[in-house]
Amino acid sequence: MTGLSEALLHPTVGTAGLVAAMGYAVVFLGLVMLLAVVAVMGKVMVASRKKAAPAPAVPEVPAPAPAERPVAKGTAGQLKLYNVSERDAALVMAIVAHKLGRPVNELRFRSIREVEEK
Amino acid sequence: MNILDTLGKLASESGFAGFLAAGGWKNLIMIAIACVLLYLGIVKKFEPLLLVGIAFGCLLTNLPGAGLYHLDMWDAYVAGTPYTTAAGEVIENITFTTIIHEGGLLDIFYIGVKAGIYPSLIFLGVGAMTDFGPLLANPKSLLLGAAAQLGVFVAFFGAVLLGFTGPEAACIGIIGGADGPTAIFQTTKLAPWLLGPIAIAAYSYMALIPMIQPPIMKFMTTPAMRKVKMEQSREVSKTEKIIFPIAVSAFVILLLPSTAPLIGCLMLGNLLRECGVTDRLSDTAQNALMNIVTIFLATSVGATMVAERFLSLDTIKIVFLGLAAFAVSTAGGLLGGRVMYRLSGGKINPLIGSAGVSAVPMAARVSQDVGRKYNKTNYLLMHAMGPNVAGVIGSAIAAGFFLSVFGG
């Protein structure tokens, strides 16, 4: 503890009391100031959220045409089915993936068509 | 070759002979203490992640002849005095490089404690695990985190009265912050010779919080206060959670630069958690890194529990002062809770004040458990998490204050 004064190295009861009171005050002061920062930040955030929330009333418009079904994550585009139910298509894809030894989302199926025997 | 001579030489050089040497019985007592700590950690599950490592470090360091940790070398390092090696070589100036060459395994581990690396890295993990949302939703809980530091300064005062020096008293006081890494960080800087007993007291009392706090909570509050149901806190946006660690780091470090390693790492860990683009780093900080550092920290802290230093009257005083620090900090938090109960017109349950002593999340759980005992429909946990994490910042500020005053 080089450079520490004797008064702090071996504090008297008075000095110890003063250091303790000062320390508690510093902790309070620090956290009160932090409270002010956090409270202001919270107020700004709440105000900005309220400002953004009330969107202007939109006149009624006819419902838009149904959009294409969203593509599932990991798939490569839409699959066209010809005379095949979704269940059968899923089975076909699972069998192909199994035979190739690759996960089904790494394969691209463009279309599945039932071939009719002549 | 005389077989009897050889056997005699082996026996006299073995560690067992060390127990019969002068003061060897003290090592036996320390080994017994290590076994008790292992029992508490493994069987009673008192902070097992730390206590098991600390106890095992204590066991290793007290096995005569193992030479894993050299107390005299570290004393020479702290005092800046020459050190004589086992081979008789005198080293004028001990540095970390000397310790790596001359020291044992635990000496090398201990460099991480001495350099303040492990406590800071633990804070990085704590930051990555902590959700500051409840604090942001109710910033007033910062006041409870401040109020609950009362025990730190009361214990400091008590330690001076019991004859400890200023820096030693500051390290004993910080036990009341109920924050192990902060206590270790400060003690290695101000009074490294007290590290063993202070770490043991801090972690033991943290484990005993469910037993220490409830009687004080009942004594300091009325049944009507304990039944208060608090309103749902507001929702906190992601942006707020991202800005918070940046703002706190800048603000607190500017206020008390000596808190930079602890607050900096705590808030960096929290930013990794909240920013949403560093999930891998957050995961590493919370799990792998935290676990690795815990092993090094615990064993090297345990290694400082050398018989000739640990078995003293000072250790007993530290154990009692540590308990007093915990109890007064709990009372301070509850007192703050009572003031807020009055000022809010009875909307704040004062039981959340006791969670201001840090010890995340144990102290918050105690507030929840005691609150539910008196009102089955009461859920105080999230409300108590606010003061709980505020206590972590509060104890780091208290440590920063002591480091500024006594750091020389």
Image (cartoon, rainbow, N blue to C red):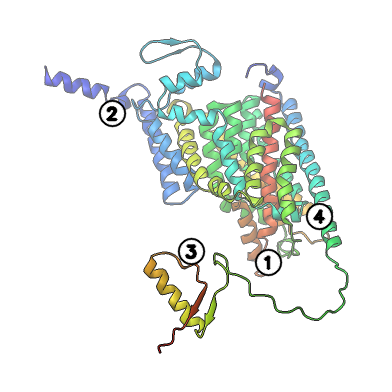
Residue A106 badge = 3
Label 3 residue SS: helix
Asked if B367 appears above or below B181 in the picture, the reply is below
Give the number of the mark in front: 1 or 3.
3
Quadrant of res B383: bottom right
Is residue B163 among what the camera can see? no
Query: Which residue, as the protein is rendered here, is positioned at the far front?
Result: A118
Chain to which mark 4 belongs: A
Is residue A13 among what the camera can see? yes
Do dots 1 and 4 share one subunit? no
| Relative to B115, B355 lies left or right | right
Label 1 crowding class (10 Å Cα cut-off): few <14, some 14-19, many 20+? some
Give how far across and how far down residue B61 sits, in percent. Answer: 40, 30
Chain to which mark 1 belongs: B
Do dots 4 and 2 share one subunit? no
Residue B378 badge = 1
Give how far across and how far down residue B240 sits, in percent. Answer: 75, 52
Cα distance, mark 1 to mark 2?
58 Å
Closest to the observer: B390 or A12?
B390
Quadrant containing the C terminus of chain B in the rendered view:
top right
Amino acid type of the residue tagged 4 in the rendering: Met
Give how far across and how far down residue B50 sits, in percent. Answer: 49, 43
Give the number of the mark in front: 1 or 4.
4
Asked if marks 1 and 4 touch (Cβ < 8 Å), the reply is: no
